[in-house]
Structures are given as structure tokens and as C-alpha cells.
Amino acid sequence: MTLSEIGLAAAEPIDDHVGLAFPRSLSAALQTAGTFWSSMDRRHFLTATAFSAAAFGPPTLRWLSQNTDDASAHTGGRRIGRADITELSELAEQARHTDSRFGGASAGVSAVAVCLRDVASPMLGGTYTDAVGKELFAATAVLGRLAGWADFDAGHHPRAQRQFIQALRMSRAAGEVALGGYVLSCMALQACLRDYHDDALDMIDAATSATRHSPPRVRAFLYLVEARVHARARSPKAAGQALAVSERLLERADSRTGDDPTWIDFHTRARLAADAVEIHRDLGRPAEALRWNEEATMPADRFARSYGIRMAVVSSAHVQARDLEAALPAAHTSVDILGRVASQRARDYLDDLVGRFAPWRSEPEVRLLTDRVGSGASPSTQR
């Protein structure tokens, strides 16, 4: 089968395992990615298959052990040039900011899947030089990671898993170790938030091991994810060590310029602080969580989902401290923000938050909060 024939193949029944493979050869990798992207918008991946953290194991191992593909040049359809790469990169940037503001299930982010199917996949079957090929694979990996993150955020975990694996393979084809490590960190977060902590640690260990020579801002984010996983696994010493390494690397990154990829520019001191709030909440340290919150000054309009989730975490930290008076305003702020965000992950945080108010469930203000979260209505109709 050629890449140009993949669109016809998509009409056939879908194998449950499509998209989970990390092929050794580049030609097989392009065919696998194209087959998956041509079929991923079908409901099959939303209903007929299940997320399996174990399925991340073989791709992670192969990413670690397999060298970059020797030749990236391809002869096929229309000639692909750097203007085409720029088109993909600009769309990825637009989608990344839309995701932060409106959530992974928003219409603007769903365009990434269409781009992979209708634009990126045909480009992979085109004619390009080795240098352009590597840039094309890197741009496609960025788009695939975004598509995976959007699906993860929207609660479509089986499809997100496949997106991440294909993005990981494209990053290897591009020779972009740092980007591959970033994709692995997203895979680790997905596994972690679904309570597969050991699998998540395997992936983040692979990422930190392979990226020793990558830009410090990238490595700082990887160690921040490691700290989050350890915190979820209730390992305070390991979480603290990983968070300290992340801080040091971020300080080093902030002292230099010029080597940060665009896709990691979101990782600032404020982002680290926002995640540290959750890390300490997960470790049952509300005072530390609230101290870190003072530094988490990310703009609420640009990072609406992150801000809303952080307010839910801050509220739960106040609950841990048995401070209902402080917990309720933060909770309502979270509902205000997340009510405008299309994100199942955000919804999960709100549902978790309501559960934490159980000791006060008979209080009128807590009943109001529970009703607001349960209805999913806009704040103007509920307060």
C-alpha cells in the first residue's frame, strides 16, 4: 500500500491495534501513521477500544534503542518545501494557544486532526529532500502531540494514546530527541492521571535519560512531570528531589537565550509554581501548596484551563487545611472559568473537588457548589 492509497483503506474495518505500533523502518512508520490519521476521526477509537498503559512500553523502548532513520528523502507526489513546513508549524501554534484557552474538545483544536489527515499525511507521501523530510517529520510530530493532548484533555484516551505513539515515532524520524522526550512526558502524564504510576515513571525515566544534552527548559519540564508522578504515587522524597532539579534547570534556562524550541516556551517559573501547587496538594501539604500558589501568576485569559484547574486544586488545598471559608470562593472561581472550557479533564478536577467537600455536604454553600458543578451551567444562571 502506498500513502496515496491510504484514504481508500480507511473505508475498510479498522484493526483495534492501528496506531499502537512503532515501526522500525521509516516507510512502515509513514504508512502506519497515515493509516491511523485517515481513520482516527471515526467513533471506533472512542467506543470500541480501551486505553492500556502497557501499550506504551514497546514504543518507549524502541524510541530509546533505535537510531534516527538514515535517509529521510522521499519521491512520490508533489514537491514539499519549507513553505509547507511553515504552514504546519503555524497551524500548530494557533491550535496550542486555542487549547490553552478553550480546551482540547473545542472546535479550534479539532482542526489539528483534520490537518493531520488532509494536509500532513499527503505531504509525507510527497517528494522532498532529506533536510526537508526531517523538518516535515518534526512538524508532524508537534501536530501529533497536540492532537494527542487534545484527545487526552477531551477524555478520548485510546485515541490520544495512539496520537502520542505516532508523534513519538515521527520525532525519532526527525532526529529530535528533545521533542521525543516532550512527547514521552505527555504520555507519562496520561498514564499518571489514570493511576498507572509505575508505567508513567518508566516513560519519564526514559525521557530524562535520553535528553541529557537537550535544552534545560525541556529537561526542566520533564523533571516537573516526574515530580507530579511521584506526588500522585505518594512518594514525597522523590517528588521533592525531582521538583528541585526542575527548579535548577529552569533557572539555568532563564539565564540563557536562543536554544528553546517554540513548543516549550510555556514552561516558565509561573508554570512550575502552578504544578507545584498540585504536587504539594497531592502530598497532603496544603500550606506548601498555598505558598506556591502565590508564584503561579499565569494569565487567566491565555491559560484559562490551567488557571481554572489550579483554582480547583487551591480550593482542595484549603479543604485539606479545613478552611471552608477560603475553599468555597476558589471553588466557585474554578467553576466560573472551567464552565467556559471544553475539557473532560477539567470536569474531572471539578468532580474530584466536589467529593472533597463531602464533610460539609449539608452546608447550603456546599450544596450550591455541588449543584453548579452537577449542572455544568454558566455562572450567570447559577449565582
Image (cartoon, rainbow, N blue to C red):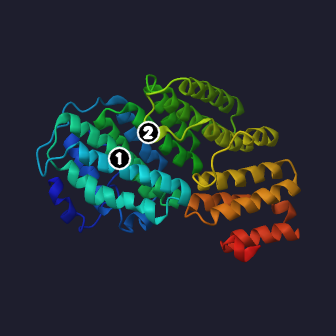
Disc on res. 213 = none
Picture quarter with the N terminus: bottom left
Estimate how packed mark 1 is, as few (under 14), some (14 to 19) or many (20 or more) residues with alpha carbons within 10 Å.
Answer: many
Image point (54%, 35%), residue name: 221
The kind of residue on which mark 1 rests is Ser
Q: Quadrant of residue 275?
A: top right
Residue 113 point in image, percent of width and height: 36, 59
Is 202 situated left or right of 292 in this image? left
Element at label 1: helix
Mark-to-mark CA distance, 2 and 1 = 10 Å
Report if the CB atoms under discs 2 and 1 are less than 8 Å apart.
yes
Estimate how packed mark 2 is, as few (under 14), some (14 to 19) or many (20 or more) residues with alpha carbons within 10 Å.
Answer: few
Residue 376 point in image, percent of width and height: 65, 71
**Nearer to us in this view, 368 or 192:** 368
- According to the picture, the residue beneath numbered tag 2 turns out to be 262
Residue 189 point in image, percent of width and height: 54, 45
Element at label 2: helix
- According to the picture, the residue beneath numbered tag 1 turns out to be 89
**Nearer to us in this view, 226 or 50:** 226
Q: Earlier in the sequence, mark 2 or mark 1?
A: 1
Picture quarter with the C terminus: bottom right
Is 370 situated left or right of 10 in this image? right
Is 318 situated left or right of 107 in this image? right
Image point (22%, 40%), residue name: 26
Residue 23 visible in rendering: no
Residue 365 visible in rendering: yes
Residue 83 point in image, percent of width and height: 25, 46
Image point (33%, 61%), residue name: 114
Q: Is residue 71 above or below residue 144?
A: above
The kind of residue on which mark 2 rests is Thr
